[in-house]
Amino acid sequence: MSDLLRFATAGSVDDGKSTLIGRLLFDSKGLFTDQLEDIERISQRRGNDYVDLSLLTDGLRAEREQGITIDVAYRYFATPRRKFIIADTPGHVQYTRNMVTGASTADVALILVDARKGVTEQSRRHAFLATLLGVSHLVLCVNKMDLVDWSEDVFRTIVDDFKEFAAKLIVGDLSSIPVSALLGDNVVTRSEHTPWFEGATLLSLLENLHVASDRNLVDVRFPVQLVIRPQSSAARDYRGYAGNLASGILKVGDPIRVLPSGLETTVAGIDTASGPVDEAFPPMSIVVRLAEEIDVSRGDMLVRPRNVPTVTQDVEALICWMDESATLSARKKYAIKHTTRWARALVRDVEYRIDVNTLHRHIEDDELALNDIGRVTLRITAPLFVDAYRENRETGSFILVDESTNRTVAAGLVLRR
């Protein structure tokens, strides 16, 4: 069975992110006939003398009229080697929060750069955000190479410039590819125009990229989402705990500790939609049965007795503020959702705001506005079971919700204590 790879596009406006995805889908035979007919019809109506493949992801009317991406567009396709989920994220500065949403679950970030413009402020911003969100693999796609006569010098200069900035970040793996999304060069098929480039095409790189080791398979974390108790007489003795295995490998017979109670037992069985299994790994959806009847409810977490997360009511975190109508500052209160657990949070302090272009910390700033990122300390009304985001993306992340409007106003990344 082929595995799944999630990747997100990033970069400045008009760098060709949507066109690149359209080309990837088109050349890999990932389009349905009606989809192709639809974009051909719209392209003709707009007076284009070519099929505008960016229309595959620019689904909103406002996006198609302006030729930009506003929302995060998700697309799915598969090759014989792998399945893919693509997040096409916006390039505009004011939609940075959408980029954070799209990259938060990605294994790979494709950073597009227009070969004529080079590395821009937004290129750096998105690269920083991707690494901040724990994306281990960056692929620098130098696009529109056809407009610079396929110059190797232009490509190398852009790559060197990007690497100089990336040296300040935590980048696990960085690859660079010269492409033309419009013409398809080095996207799915190798280009004859770049004989000096010896690397793989974009699709080949994505098909063969190893991401399984990026997952945390050591720390067992199972947030309980639902208690399963069938009402039928045939299954009245059944009691299971449903959810997604956030990390680690869970096996039948493993010792388990329940948080926050601290009670211990063993795993009696693991059930899935396809039937029982002997072991589970992330991100499987499973139902865990325990050997003893212990009081477990939604928001609790199953862990290994000798490998537990930090249980705390004081959290230090990086916050990406997403609300247009208000700012984040000290003494404000919000609802907080961490895994399946809800509580309330008080902002104790805004320590600094990060300039995402220069990475400078502005310690004089004591509030965060739309799209700002900064370090804050929170006081929680109930204990949370957290890991540092760098170690576990699932138990190291949370959202803040304005209880008066029910809007999600921030995404948070737990820092190592």
Image (cartoon, helix red, strand yellow):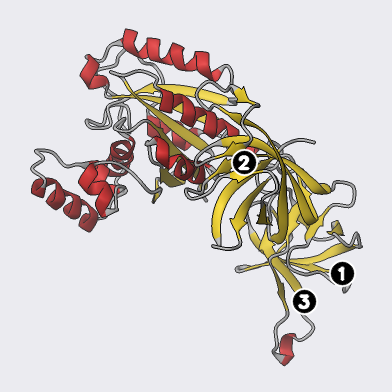
Q: Is residue 228 left or right of residue 181?
A: right
Q: Is residue 22 left or right of residue 122?
A: left
Residue found at x 33% / y 40%? 21
Q: Nearer the viewer, residue 389 or 292?
A: 389
| Three-letter amino acid code at the position of disc 2 | Ile
Q: Quadrant of the C terminus?
A: top right
Residue designated by label 3:
239
Depth-wise, is mark 3 or mark 2 nearer the camera? 2
Badge 1 or badge 3: first in the primary sequence: 3
Q: Are marks 3 and 2 in contact (CB under 8 Å)?
A: no
Badge 2 or badge 1: first in the primary sequence: 1
Q: List x then y, in percent, for residue 113.
A: 36, 24
| Three-letter amino acid code at the position of disc 1 | Ala
Mark 3 secondary-structure assignment: loop
Badge 3 or badge 2: first in the primary sequence: 3
Above-or-below relation of 233 to 276 = below
Residue found at x 22% / y 14%? 149
Q: Nearer the viewer, residue 175 or 169?
A: 169
Residue designated by label 2:
319
Q: List x then y, in percent, for residue 124.
A: 47, 24
Residue designated by label 1:
291
Mark 1 secondary-structure assignment: loop
Q: Is residue 134 visible?
A: no
Q: Are marks 2 and 1 in contact (CB under 8 Å)?
A: no
